[in-house]
C-alpha cells in the first residue's frame, strides 16, 4: 500500500485536530436555564452575567469558544413572518408631493386657472385645473419636479409619471421608482425592526428578508409572539402639524386637503390639521422617558439640525397658535406655542404611565417604520418544550451513535473500529463547522446529524466491500486495500454529490426547519466524504505500517449478504415491477380520494400545544371550546414513550378564521382560559399560527422543491451516465415519493413542511443507492463487452448487495432510534424517512434497473442487442 505524502498526512491530521478543538466547546454548552438567566440579565443590564457563555461553564478562555446557536424549537421564543404594506409608501409619497405640485401650479395660475385636488386611488395624485387649454403648461410645471431614479434598474428614468386628460392632471410613481421605493422600504423596515429588538437587549435574533415584501423575525427568549408583535408591530410615526381647528363631528370637517384626526386623550374630539407636517419623526435623534413639571410620565425628544431649524422657524412665526403632536394617526397633544423654541428639543405629555412612556421612547428612538405590516405567520415556543426537545435530541444522538458503532463492529471487526474512529472524527468536524459558521441548531437539524451518522458509514461500507472483493480474488493485503479505496472513489463521489445536490435544493427553496435540516445534511455529506476518502485511508495505512500484517480480514461476527450471491432480480419481474406500478397507481388514487391531512403549514390556522400532569378529559376540552364559534377544531392527545409518566400532551388545532390570517392573540388567550377552566394545572408550551395566504404559497413551494430536486438529479445522472440511466433513476424516485405520500393519505398522517424535507431527503437517499449499482454496471459493461445487459445488471446488483443492505440497515438503525427516542415533534419526519429507506432499497433493486433494461443502452455505438429489449422475458 503506497504511503501518503507527509504534507498530506499533516494536513489531514491538522484538519481533524481543528475539528476536535472547535467542536469541544459545545460539550460545555450552557443549560437552557442558564441561557434564559443570561438573556434576562442582558435585557435588564445590557451586559452578560459572569458564568454564562462567556466562560462556557469552565471551558478555558484561551481556547476556541464558538458555539452553535440554539433554534427556537430548542430554546423557546417567538417567530413572526410579516408582510410590509409597501403600497402605503407610494400613497405617502403622493401626500408629500402635493404641496410642491400645488406651489408649481400656482406659479402658472394665469395659464392653468384654478387648482383643485381630486379624490384618487392610493398611490396617485389627481388635480383638476380650471383652464383645460393650459394643460401643456401644467404638465411642464409638474414634470419639472421629477428627479432621476436612484437605482441601477432605473437608469435614465425619473421618479414620477405625469399625464393629462381633459382638465385632470394625474401623477403617479414610475415603475422604476416603485421598485426602488419598495427596496428602500424593505431595507428600512429591516433596520428599524432590528434596532427595536436590540433596544430591549434580546440576544441572537434572526431578522431577515424573505421574498419581495416579507420579513422573518425570530427572537429567542422572548415570552410570546404577541409580546414581540407589540414591540415591532406599531409604525410609531411621529409628526408635528399646524392646527386649523377642532370639531366633534369629523364628517365633512375641514377642506378636502385637510387632515382630520381623533384626540388620544379627549374621546369624541377631533383636530383639523394641515396635511403637510412641519417636522416628522425622521428628524428625531433621541427620545428618553422623563417626567413633566407636574411629575407625570412624559417623553423628552430632540431633533437633528434640519429638524431643529424647521421646528424653531415655525415656533417663532406662530407664537400663540396651537400645533399638534401626532403619533400613529392620533393627536396625543396639541399645546399652544408660548415662545420661540430654537434648540430643537421638547417634551411629549399624555395620558400614559411609566411603562408606556418607556416603550414609546424605545419606538421613537428606533425610528418609524415606513409602512404598516400584516403578520402572516406566528409561533410561540415555551422554554419547557425547548428543554424537552434538547433532551430528546441528545438522547437520540447518543443512542444512535452507540447503535451504529456496535453494528459496524459486528459487521467489520477491526476495520469497523477504524470506521468508527472516522465516524467520531466526522461528527467532530460537522459540529466544528456548524459552530464556526454560526449555524442555528434546530430539532430537524439534530435529526440531520443523527441521520448523517447512519448515512456517513456508506462510504466506508463501499470501500470495505470493495476490499473484500479484492481479497476474494487473491490479491495481497496491501494491494487489495489500495485497489478497494481507488475503485470505490467513483461510486462515493457520485452517490454523495447527488445527496449534496438535494441538500442545496432544500436550502434554496425551503424555509425554517427544512433549511435547518438541509444545512446539517449538506455539511454532513461533505465531512463524511472527507473522513471516508482521506481519514479512513490514513488510519488503515497507519495500522498497516505499524502491524505489517501478511493477511487481513474485513469481516466480523455478522454478515448480511453471503459472498458471491447469484440472485436473479428479474426472475419475477412482472410480479415485482407490477407491484410497484400498482402501488404508485393506488397511492395516486388514495391522494385523490382521501386527500392529505395537511398540517398548519399548508392549511393555515392555529395550533396550541398544552401539557398537563393530570389525565386528559378530551370531552371536557371539546365542551370548553364548543361555545366559542371557532369553526373546525381538532383536539388530539400526543403519545410518546419518552414522556414522563405524569406528562400528558395535547394539541389543539383551530382552522384559519374568516377575515383573519389566523387566530388573534386575544382569541388564543380566550382558548387558553377556557381550557384552563376545566384543567387548572395545564401549561401552554407552544402556539403556532399560519395565515392561509402563506399556506397556499407553501404548497406550491413544496411542489417546486420536490420537482427541482428530481430535475437536478435527472440532469446529473444524465451527465454522468446515459439518458436511460437518468430516466430509470427518476422513475425510481417518483415511485418512492408517490408511495410514501400515498401511505400518509391512507393513514391520515399529518403532512407538513418537515415531511417535505423528508421527501427531499428520500430523493437523495434513493438516488444514492441507485447510482452505486449503476456505477458498478458502467464498470462491468467495459469489463464484459459481450455479456447481455440483463445478466450484467444482475451481476452488478449482486456485487453491490452487501453494500445495499449495510447502508439501508445502518440508516434504519439511526431512524428507529430517532423514532423511539427523538420526541413527538419530529416523529412524522422520521416515519416518512423510514418509509423512504425501505422503498428506496426496493426501487433500486426492482424499479430503476427494469426501466433501463426496457429502454436498452447503446453499447459501443452498435445496434442494441435484442436481449436488451426482452423486458418481458421470464427465465424458465
Image (cartoon, rainbow, N blue to C red):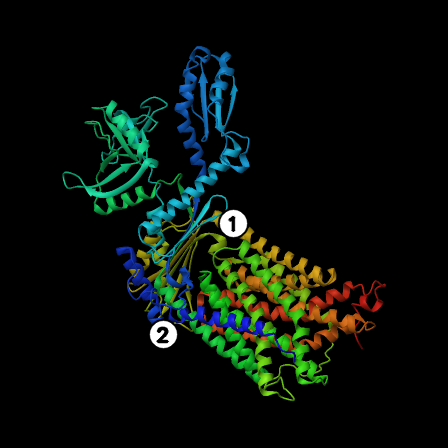
- Residue 676 occupies quadrant: bottom left
Report the residue marked by disc 1.
Answer: 696
Q: Taking 802 as reference, is 276 left or right?
A: left
Q: Is residue 250 above or below residue 28?
A: above
- Residue 361 occupies quadrant: top left
> What residue is shown at x 62% (from left), y 81% (from top)?
560
Report the residue marked by disc 2.
Answer: 645
**Residue situated furthest front in the rendering:** 6
Q: Nearer the viewer, residue 866 or 653?
A: 866
Quadrant for the N terminus in the image: bottom right
Q: Is residue 271 above or below residue 589?
A: above
Mark 1 closeness class: few <14, some 14–19, many ≥20 residues within 10 Å: some
| Residue 368 point in image, percent of width and height | 35, 40
Quadrant for the C terminus in the image: bottom right
| Residue 437 point in image, percent of width and height | 47, 60
| Residue 139 point in image, percent of width and height | 50, 19
Q: Nearer the viewer, residue 52 or 857?
A: 52
**Residue situated furthest bottom in the rendering:** 550
Q: Taking 393 as reference, is 317 left or right?
A: left
Amino acid at each position: 500500500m503506497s504511503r501518503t505524502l507527509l504534507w498530506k498526512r499533516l494536513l489531514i491530521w491538522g484538519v481533524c485536530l481543528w475539528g476536535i478543538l472547535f467542536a469541544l466547546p459545545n460539550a460545555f454548552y450552557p443549560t437552557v436555564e442558564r441561557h434564559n438567566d443570561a438573556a434576562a440579565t442582558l435585557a435588564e443590564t445590557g451586559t452578560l452575567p459572569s458564568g454564562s457563555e462567556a466562560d462556557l461553564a469552565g471551558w478555558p478562555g484561551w481556547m476556541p469558544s464558538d458555539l452553535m446557536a440554539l433554534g427556537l424549537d430548542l430554546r423557546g421564543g417567538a417567530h413572526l413572518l410579516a408582510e410590509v404594506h409597501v403600497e402605503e409608501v407610494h400613497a405617502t409619497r403622493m401626500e408629500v408631493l402635493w404641496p410642491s405640485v400645488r406651489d408649481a401650479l400656482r406659479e402658472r395660475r394665469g395659464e392653468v386657472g384654478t387648482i383643485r385636488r381630486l379624490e384618487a386611488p392610493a398611490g396617485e395624485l389627481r388635480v383638476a385645473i380650471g383652464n383645460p387649454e393650459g394643460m401643456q403648461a401644467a404638465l411642464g410645471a409638474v414634470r419639472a419636479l421629477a428627479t432621476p431614479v436612484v437605482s441601477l434598474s432605473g437608469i435614465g428614468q425619473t421618479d414620477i409619471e405625469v399625464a393629462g386628460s381633459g382638465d385632470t392632471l394625474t401623477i403617479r410613481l414610475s415603475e422604476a421608482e416603485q421598485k426602488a421605493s419598495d427596496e428602500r422600504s424593505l431595507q428600512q423596515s429591516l433596520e428599524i425592526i432590528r434596532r427595536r429588538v436590540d433596544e430591549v437587549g434580546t440576544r441572537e435574533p434572526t431578522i431577515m428578508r424573505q421574498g419581495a415584501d416579507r420579513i422573518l423575525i425570530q427572537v429567542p427568549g422572548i415570552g410570546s409572539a404577541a409580546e414581540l408583535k407589540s414591540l415591532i408591530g406599531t409604525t410609531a410615526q411621529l409628526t408635528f402639524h399646524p392646527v386649523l381647528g377642532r370639531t366633534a363631528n369629523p364628517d365633512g370637517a375641514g377642506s378636502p386637503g385637510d387632515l382630520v384626526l381623533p384626540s388620544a386623550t379627549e374621546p369624541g374630539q377631533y383636530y383639523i390639521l394641515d396635511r403637510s407636517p412641519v417636522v416628522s419623526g425622521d428628524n428625531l435623534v433621541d427620545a428618553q422617558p422623563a417626567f413633566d413639571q407636574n411629575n407625570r410620565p412624559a417623553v423628552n425628544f430632540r431633533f437633528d439640525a434640519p429638524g431643529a431649524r424647521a421646528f424653531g422657524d415655525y415656533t417663532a412665526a406662530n407664537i400663540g397658535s396651537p400645533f399638534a403632536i401626532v403619533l400613529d394617526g392620533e393627536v396625543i397633544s396639541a399645546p399652544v406655542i408660548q415662545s420661540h423654541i430654537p434648540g430643537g428639543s421638547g417634551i411629549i405629555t399624555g395620558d400614559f404611565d411609566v411603562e408606556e412612556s418607556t416603550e414609546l421612547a424605545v419606538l421613537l428612538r428606533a425610528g418609524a417604520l415606513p409602512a404598516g405590516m400584516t403578520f402572516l405567520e406566528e409561533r410561540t415556543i415555551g422554554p419547557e418544550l425547548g428543554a424537552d426537545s434538547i433532551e430528546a435530541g441528545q438522547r437520540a444522538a447518543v443512542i444512535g451513535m452507540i447503535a451504529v458503532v456496535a453494528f459496524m463492529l459486528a459487521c467489520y471487526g477491526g476495520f469497523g473500529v477504524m470506521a468508527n474512529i472516522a465516524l467520531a472524527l466526522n461528527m467532530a468536524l460537522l459540529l466544528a463547522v456548524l459552530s464556526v459558521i454560526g449555524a442555528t441548531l434546530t430539532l430537524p437539524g439534530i435529526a440531520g446529524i443523527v441521520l448523517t451518522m447512519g448515512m456517513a458509514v456508506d462510504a466506508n461500507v463501499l470501500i470495505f466491500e470493495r476490499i473484500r472483493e479484492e481479497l476474494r480474488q487473491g490479491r495481497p493485503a496491501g494491494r487489495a486495500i489500495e485497489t478497494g479505496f481507488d475503485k470505490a472513489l467513483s461510486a462515493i463521489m457520485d452517490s454523495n454529490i447527488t445527496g449534496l445536490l438535494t441538500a442545496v435544493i432544500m436550502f434554496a427553496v425551503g424555509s425554517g426547519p427544512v433549511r435547518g435540516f438541509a444545512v446539517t445534511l449538506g455539511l454532513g455529506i461533505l465531512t463524511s466524504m472527507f473522513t471516508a476518502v482521506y481519514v479512513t485511508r490514513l488510519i488503515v495505512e497507519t495500522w498497516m505500517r505499524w502491524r505489517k500484517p501478511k493477511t487481513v480480514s474485513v469481516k466480523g461476527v455478522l454478515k448480511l449478504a453471503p459472498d458471491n450471491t447469484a440472485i436473479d432480480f428479474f426472475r419475477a419481474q412482472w410480479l415485482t415491477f407490477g407491484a410497484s406500478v400498482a402501488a404508485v397507481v393506488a397511492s395516486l388514487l388514495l391522494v385523490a380520494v382521501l386527500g392529505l391531512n395537511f398540517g398548519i403549514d399548508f392549511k393555515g390556522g392555529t395550533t396550541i400545544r398544552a401539557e398537563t400532569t393530570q389525565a386528559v378529559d378530551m370531552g371536557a376540552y371539546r365542551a370548553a371550546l364548543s361555545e366559542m364559534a371557532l369553526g373546525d377544531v381538532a383536539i388530539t392527545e400526543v403519545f410518546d414513550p419518552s414522556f414522563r409518566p405524569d406528562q400528558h400532551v395535547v394539541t389543539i388545532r383551530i382552522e384559519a378564521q374568516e377575515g383573519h390570517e389566523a387566530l388573534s392573540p386575544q382569541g388564543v388567550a380566550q382558548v387558553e382560559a377556557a381550557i384552563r377552566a376545566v384543567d387548572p394545572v395545564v401549561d401552554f408550551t407552544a402556539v403556532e399560527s399560519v395565515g392561509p395566504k402563506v399556506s397556499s404559497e407553501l404548497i406550491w413551494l413544496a411542489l417546486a422543491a420536490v420537482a427541482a430536486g428530481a430535475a437536478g438529479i435527472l440532469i446529473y445522472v444524465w451527465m454522468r451516465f446515459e439518458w436511460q440511466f437518468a430516466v430509470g433513476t427518476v422513475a425510481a424516485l417518483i415511485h418512492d415519493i408517490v408511495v410514501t405520500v400515498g401511505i400518509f393519505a391512507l393513514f391520515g398522517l399529518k403532512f407538513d413542511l418537515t415531511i417535505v424535507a423528508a421527501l427531499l431527503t428520500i430523493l437523495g437517499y434513493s438516488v444514492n443507492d441507485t447510482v452505486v449499482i449503476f456505477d458498478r454496471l458502467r464498470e462491468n459493461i467495459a469489463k464484459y463487452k459481450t455479456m447481455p445487459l440483463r445478466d450484467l445488471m444482475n451481476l452488478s446488483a449482486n456485487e453491490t448487495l452487501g453494500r445495499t443492505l449495510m447502508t439501508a440497515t445502518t440508516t434504519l438503525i439511526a431512524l428507529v432510534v430517532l423514532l423511539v427516542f427523538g420526541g413527538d415533534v419530529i416523529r412524522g419526519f422520521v416515519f416518512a424517512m423510514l418509509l423512504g429507506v425501505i422503498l428506496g432499497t426496493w426501487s433500486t433493486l426492482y424499479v430503476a434497473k427494469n426501466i433501463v433494461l426496457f429502454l436498452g443502452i447503446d453499447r459501443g455505438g452498435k445496434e442494441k442487442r435484442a436481449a436488451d429489449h426482452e423486458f418481458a422475458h421470464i427465465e424458465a
